[in-house]
């Protein structure tokens, strides 16, 4: 248990490609967001959820916070998470990454670095929705969002990825790690993704 790390779950996505709130889809007897909360609770003593519809998640019995900035996706979620964190380090996790493991989270947290962000690269992509973000980033994230609001910062695609390109981050080559599997960072966006998750977990239980 990492007493110096807050677990922050982002559940603010619109789920437009899924057609329904994917955080409230069920895997077995629990909602996907319950699964994410349970996983992080094994590592972090304090969990918070960032959502613009907190009334949907009261059953989680964890602190719920809205975005201070609206319309800027995960960057706004990161900002709200850092704003409400009481620790220097935070593990940010999107609620729709169902195959992430406790071992992977612990290894990312334990990775030695003096940089403010620690993320994995896998399958050719930077996995920005499952990594360590230091609270000392809050001012920089606020400046970025204020710049986007004022129009002095150009909005290009995912605002979080654009922000990460401007700062020095630690990147772990996940594919060479013993704890890596090809589905580890699988992101569930479409109904076919949900079907795949259900099928794979069913197969895992049958083994």
Image (tube, helix red, strand yellow):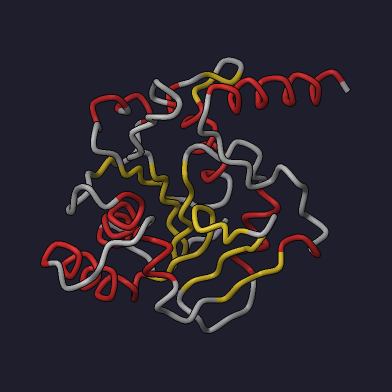
Q: Is residue 117 above or below residue 161?
A: below
Quadrant location of the N terminus in the rendered image: bottom right
Q: Is residue 65 above or below residue 198?
A: below
Q: Nearer the viewer, residue 90 or 98?
A: 98
Task: Tell me: 50 left or right of 142.
Answer: right
Residue 166 in percent (x, y) is at 40, 78
Q: Nearer the viewer, residue 101 or 143?
A: 143
**Residue farthest bottom in this picture:** 114
Instruction: Identify which residue is drawn at 60% across, 23% down.
Output: 192
**Residue farthest right in this picture:** 207
Quadrant location of the C terminus in the rendered image: top right
Task: Tell me: 125 left or right of 199.
Answer: left
Task: Tell me: 203 left or right of 129.
Answer: right
Instruction: Identify which residue is drawn at 14% across, 67% down.
Output: 151
Q: Which quarter of the figure has residue 149? A: bottom left
**Residue farthest left in this picture:** 150
Instruction: Identify which residue is drawn at 34% across, 76% down.
Output: 136
Residue 30 in percent (x, y) is at 53, 20
Q: Is residue 94 above or below residue 178?
A: above
Residue 37 in percent (x, y) is at 48, 38
- In the rendered picture of this protein, how many numbered marks are placed on residues? 0
Q: Is residue 49 above or below residue 154?
A: above
Q: Nearer the viewer, residue 74 or 90?
A: 74
Task: Tell me: 119 left or right of 167.
Answer: right
Instruction: Identify which residue is drawn at 49% across, 23% down.
Output: 31
């Amino acid at each position: 248990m990492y007493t110096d790390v807050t677990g922050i779950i982002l559940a603010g996505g619109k789920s437009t490609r899924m057609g329904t709130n994917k955080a409230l889809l069920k895997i077995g007897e629990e909602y996907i967001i319950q699964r994410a909360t349970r996983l992080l609770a094994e590592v972090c003593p304090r969990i918070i959820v960032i959502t613009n519809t907190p009334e949907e998640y009261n059953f989680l019995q964890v602190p719920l916070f809205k975005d201070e900035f609206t319309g800027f996706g995960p960057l706004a979620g990161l900002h709200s998470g850092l704003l409400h964190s009481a620790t220097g380090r935070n593990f940010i996790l999107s609620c729709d990454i169902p195959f992430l493991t406790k071992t992977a989270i612990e290894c990312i947290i334990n990775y030695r670095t003096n940089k403010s962000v620690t993320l994995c690269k896998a399958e050719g992509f930077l996995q920005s929705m499952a990594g360590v973000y230091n609270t000392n980033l809050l001012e920089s994230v606020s400046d970025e969002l204020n710049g986007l609001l004022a129009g002095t910062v150009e909005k290009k695609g995912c605002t979080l990825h654009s922000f990460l390109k401007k700062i020095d981050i630690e990147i772990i080559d996940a594919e060479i790690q013993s704890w890596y599997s090809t589905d580890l960072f699988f992101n569930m966006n479409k109904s076919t993704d949900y079907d795949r998750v259900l099928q794979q977990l069913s197969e895992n239980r049958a083994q």
